[in-house]
Amino acid sequence: ILVWAEKSFQASTKKKLSPIIGLEGYKKIISYMKQLHIDIPIVAIGGIIDDDILPILQTGINGIALSGCIINADNPVEKMKQIINKTNTYK
């Protein structure tokens, strides 16, 4: 399941988005799924920036889809390395 991450800004790579749920929305979805014993991956997508990665992962979400964060970086390769290091540190 893909769940839009955006806060108050629009993703530059997507139009006509689903409702924005934010961190509290992720927590509610994860909690509800656990109550119902539903075990399918949930992926956050849409307008996610560097500073959002760890807080989103802490909600219990299974993955994060990033594009604008990387392609809009001054050095996309370096940005991807930083993101990989950040997520590996979290694990």
Image (cartoon, rainbow, N blue to C red):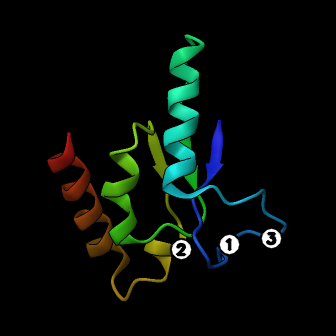
Q: Position of residue 5 (x, y in %)?
A: 57, 59
Outermost residue on the left side: it is: 89
Residue 17 against residue 35 in the figure, above or below: below
Is residue 42 in sight in this rendering? Answer: no
- Residue at 15% x, 49% y is 89
**Circle 3 or circle 2, nearest the eye:** 3
- Residue at 34% x, 56% y is 55
Question: Where is the N terminus found, in terms of image quarters?
Answer: top right
Is residue 70 in sight in this rendering? Answer: yes
Q: Position of residue 72 (x, y in %)?
A: 48, 83
- Indicate the amino acid at tag 1: Thr
Q: Badge 1 is on which residue?
A: 13
Q: Secondary structure at mark 3?
A: loop
Outermost residue on the bottom side: it is: 74
Residue 38 against residue 5 in the figure, above or below: above
Q: Nearer the viewer, residue 81 or 26?
A: 26
Q: Residues within 10 Å of mark 2 (few under 14, many from 20)?
A: some
- Residue at 53% x, 74% y is 68
- Indicate the amino acid at tag 2: Gly
Taking 59 as reference, is 15 left or right?
Answer: right
Q: Nearer the viewer, residue 88 or 6?
A: 6
Q: Badge 2 is on which residue?
A: 68
- Residue at 30% x, 56% y is 54
Q: CA distance from mark 3 to mark 2?
A: 13 Å
Check whether the beta carbons of the residues at disc 1 and disc 2 lie within 8 A of each other. Answer: yes
Q: CA distance from mark 1 to mark 2?
A: 7 Å
Q: Secondary structure at mark 1?
A: loop
Q: Badge 3 is on which residue?
A: 15
Q: Nearer the viewer, residue 2 or 66?
A: 2
- Indicate the amino acid at tag 3: Lys
Check whether the beta carbons of the residues at disc 3 and disc 2 lie within 8 A of each other. Answer: no
